Each structure stands twice: as structure tokens, then as C-alpha cells.
Amino acid sequence: MITGRVTAQDRNWEEWQKRTGELPPDFARMRSQPFLPDPLEGVKTREDWSKRRAWIRAQFEQWVFGKMPPPPGNLRAVVTGERQEGAVTVRDVRLEFGPGHKATLRLQLLIPPGPGPFPVFLTNHMRNRPWVATAVRRGYIGCIYFALDPMYGATDDSDAYIDLYPEYDFSCLARWAWSAMRAVDYLHTLPQVDKAKIAITGHSRNGKQALLAAAFDERIGAVSLSSGNTGEGNPWRYTTPTFANESIEQITGNFPHWFHPRLRFFAGREHKLPVDQNMLMALVAPRGLLLASAFSEGQGAPFGFEQAYRSARRVYEWLGHSDRIGLSLRAGEHPTTAGDIEQYVDFFDSVFARKTFARPETWILGYSYDDWKRLSGAVPPPPSPGAPLDQRIAWLLGDEPPGVPYPNATKIGGPVRSSDGWLAGLFNRPLSIAGVRNASIAFGDDLKGDLYLPEKASGKLPAVIWLHSYSHATGYSRYARPILQALAQRGYAVMAFDQIGFGTRVLHAREFYRRYPQWSLLGKMAADTQAAVAALAALEEIDASRIHLAGWDLGAKVALFTAVREPRVKSVAAIAGFDSLRAPGKETEGLMHYSHLHGLLPRLGAFVGAESKVPLDYDEILKAIAPRKVLVVAPQFDRYYPLENVRRLIQGLGHVTLDAPFDFNRFPAATQQRVWNWLQ
């Protein structure tokens, strides 16, 4: 069977674009929304909400999933087999519907003993996958529908719908979700089914379609997401390359049939999408919705999940049912355990008032600007604009508590008693890289980092500290191998470690402002990086006069704030990392990027709406780093940090070199090579 088709005519995005001639939307005329769109925008009454729901659905069909057919009015069911497996009745059914009843969908029902009516656990996971058995034990009818990726070992019945409904452009995920709705059509004909208690769930790609089905079909009473990540629980706005999970570019390139081809136009322009996943979740309200994933899985994104949950929860609160939404971010990687599925059924039981379990609300980062204001209390007034720069920087970074210098080692390879915890094992730290040896290094406040070195080297080595982007789930690990390998092969010792709130330290930021209410996360990051510089400088094998910093996005900010205070830094490569603080781009997150969203510099929140009064800007930081060299990489289509603003900040600074690739905010191989050439 042909699978993976984008449309009846096209097997991939390129064929679709060539055939249709469809061009990207006019982004200049589309509204820019750098933060998550508000599901309740303009909503004051239930009638407003009904209209808003219809608009949200239409936008998702236009840009993300394609247009679905209406429910068929001619569905009929043929029971093709029935047997007993122990006390459970197993019934095989073929649904026939659509034009000439040519569309078919196989179902398998697992019916517990007893008169019923029973709640339903609806999924497209076959029985050879660990999913439905737990629900049947808990008294649910298990209903499996055969609309799924053929990689799971079964034919995808929904693939034929492309040809049977050629006037509808619903994508693969939409066809799976539409199939789930046809299963609900059948379930509503059965006396054994408690029609008010139908739940749907699925894992990974199947979680994506489960959310869509629940959002579009109000007969589904609850849904549990499960590590669907991009296109499910993680909003598109937080899947850009800087977050190191799965971007629009990647997911539409690797799986072009999952979503409508139009979605690909928004790669690098995610802020132009009229809707985002939080709004799809809002369509489920006030029915049950559990956001579940692993906070440390490769495609994961605890930051994005938490932002989506906050937004969707507001809708539930407005509707008076905040008890029906939950957040469960578990430890571990992508696969689920039996305990995870038990928790999903717990949630369904609670929503359906069968039993009462504690509502999950697991925060990993948990930052909010309002919480910071409550914890920090009175903030000292900022220095005057004419005050020395170091005083203004110190105020912005916050009050760093007194500390003691770490007794750094003098040789590479000695004993390291600091640990980076169990997550380091999950990430296979230190990374194994061909032609590169590694060693551990202790530094700073009880921290551990990794050194990557040339296999053969003589004399003192120059060093680079690589500072990662907003990669909450995996820290520096993901996509770092080519970076570390290229630098080591060029003769550098490379130090890499996770910033607080990322990777192995992802849980360390949650209580940061309770512990250090007057400091800042960016202040802590810069202090840790200064400690890393000191640790490298103490090593006999390292040339202390040639220690460089290189960082992307978050890492660029950390590099600049470190270098301005640390004279041992030889040079800085800042990749796609900053905009003006006093005059940020109008279509960007602006100061709220630092204060409200990521909690890097909360004191900047007081200047939102009065940006011109911010005590300092990046041009002053860059100027203070002179005469040391700085490379600034500013992609021409960077929606976070507009090139024209970056140009203005570096104007007249002879020690700063600008590289403006024809790209958006990412760090591909070609740009990497130019940065390493500049370093050399």
C-alpha cells in the first residue's frame, strides 16, 4: 500500500508546491504574535467563546491539518468476529461509510464482563503495544481503531480516504483523528458504552492525533497527551532550533504527510501562525485534558509544555473547571511505563467521577514573573545612566551572594568528585566522539563539566567554552557532537556544561529565586562561566591567554555578560543571541523575553513599556569588551533579534565582526565553519 502521501497527487511537499503553485502567505500583512496567542482574546461571554472556538478550528484546518470531511451520514458496522479471551469479550468490527460505503475502518473492542455501561479507552495503539491492557483491567472498554502509522505493523485504513475524499485536503494526522471520530460514531450505538465517559489517548505521533480528535469532537470526554511533543503538547513557537527539540523545518521535512504542507511555510516565522497548540488544547475545555511527557527526552520541552499548560488552564478556570486539566512531566526518556498508563487512567477516572485521584501538576521550571516579584520583595533602584557600567551590570544581574573560589585542579584527568547526576547517564555524558578524547572537570559551586580534547596534542592548548542555547531537555548534549568535534580537530580543548535550568541541571532552577531572591538566573550563569574560565586557566595543559567563549542564543548572552567581567576571556563568538534592550524589535518578545518568559533578568520587567530607561544596552557591553575581538552572527531573518537592530548596536565598534547569514535563528554546519575559521 502506498503510504506517506501528502495528497492524492503528491508524495512530498516539493511535489505539492510544484503542482499547486501555492506561495507562502504574505507574512508582512499577518499579525505578529511572539508569545502564545490568547485563546480567550475578545471573549467575554459563552457566545463569544463559541464563535472563538469556530475561528480557532478553521485556522487549524487552514494552516496545520487541512480541511476534514463532515461526519458521514451512512455509517454501518459489520461484526467480523467475536471471541472470549478469559472473561473479556474481543469483538472485531468493520465500519463502512462514505461514498458508496467504500471507506472502511477496522475496530477491535475489548469488553470487560458485566452489564455495563462501561467507560471507553479509545486509542490507535495495537495490542502488541503497551497501552490498552491496563485500561481494560480498570474496567474500561478498550477500543482500538486501525488508523495508524504502518510502522506499528498494521495497515493504515485511513490512507484510502485520500482518494475517497479528494475534495478535502486533510493530512495524515487529521485522517487518523477523523477515524477516531468515526469510532465514536459506532460507540454511541452500543448499549454497553457509557457515552459520557469516552477517553482518548496515544503516545508520540499518536498523541498528536488524539489531541486533535478530542479538540474537534466534543463527544470525547477526556484526552491524555503522551510525549507527542512538537505538534501536540509543545507549542510551535517553542520548537524553533534554539530549543533543540523538533522544529517545523525538521518535522515537516522528515514527515511531510503528517501536517498540511502550508505549515512548512512558517519555519522561522512561527510567530506569524495565527494559532498554536495551546489553542488546540483550549478547544478541549472544559472536558478532561492531561499534558504528559518526559522532561528529559530528546524531543521534549518542559518549557513549552509549561507555557501551553498555563495558557490552556486559563480557559478551564474561566469555564469553572480547573480541576479537569493536569500537567505531568515525568523523569526519563520517550517510552512510557505501565505506571504512566495507570496515571492516565487515574486522570480519566477522576474526570469521569469514577474515583478521585490527586490532580497532576508537575512543574519542572515553574517560573513566573509574578512569583519572582513576590519572592524578591523590594528591589533597589537602578543606578543612574551615568553610573559606571560595572555598577549598572551588577544591578541588572542582581546581588551575587559572597562565595569562595573553587580549588581548581592543575592537570587534566585527575579525580573529579563532583557529579552531574543521573541525567548525565541518560545523555551518555561525556559524549563519545570519533577522534576526540574526553575528561571530566570540576569547577564553581560544586559543578561538573566535560572537556573534549584532540586525541594527539603537544604544548599548551587554546580552549573554547561552548555555551548552549535554550535546550532545556538535553542541555548541551543534543546537536553538539559536530561542534565539539570540529573544535577539537582544530586543536582546541573544548569545555561544555549545562547552565542552571537545562539538561542535567533542569530541576535546579525551580527553587532558584526562593533561594536567591535578589540574584538572577543570568547572573548565576555568568558566575558559573567565570568559574569555568578559572578552571581552564588553572590547567597546565591549557594556554590561559587563549580562552575563548562561543555561544548560541542563550549562550551568546551568557558569553557577553561573562566576558565583560572576566578579563581572561580572549574573544567571544556570539551567535544569534541579542537585540537592543532599549529599543527592541516591535515583533519580538522584547524585555519580557528576559523578565516574564525565561526569568533570566527579572529586574528588566519594571521597564516593559519604558524600554528607553533601561540602565544599559548591549552596545555598551560590546564596547567594554574591547580591545578583545567579538564575532556577532546575526541571521538576516532572525525573528528574535532583528539584524537592523544588531547593526545599530555594533556600529563604529572596530573590534566587532558581523556575520549575517541568509538564514533564520539557527546554527547550521556552514555557519559553524565560518565561526571556527574566525576563531582560528
Image (cartoon, rainbow, N blue to C red):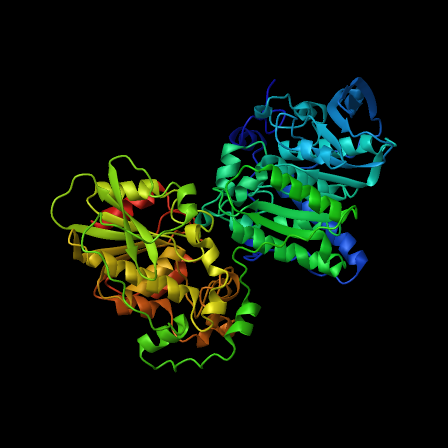
Q: Where does the N terminus fall, quadrant-wise?
A: top right
Residue at 28 percent across and 64 percent down: it is 563
Q: In this view, does 599 lie above or below 390?
A: above
Depth order, front residue of 189/249 = 189
State the image quarter where residue 621 is shown: bottom left
State the image quarter where residue 309 is shown: bottom right
Residue at 72 percent across and 34 percent down: it is 137
Q: Is residue 327 visible?
A: yes
Q: How many labels does the image show?
A: 0
Q: Is residue 395 above or below residue 69?
A: below
Depth order, front residue of 49/440 = 440
State the image quarter where residue 191 is shown: top right
Q: Where is residue 666 in the image (x, y as percent from the top left)?
A: 41, 47
Depth order, front residue of 361/84 = 84
Depth order, front residue of 54/319 = 319
Q: Residue furthest left?
A: 459
Q: Where is residue 541 in the image (x, y as percent from the top left)?
A: 16, 51
Q: Where is residue 352 in the image (x, y as percent from the top left)?
A: 78, 46
Residue at 85 percent across and 32 percent down: it is 192
Left or right for 154, reference 539: right
Q: Position of residue 455 (x, y in %)?
A: 20, 39
Q: Is residue 40 visible?
A: no
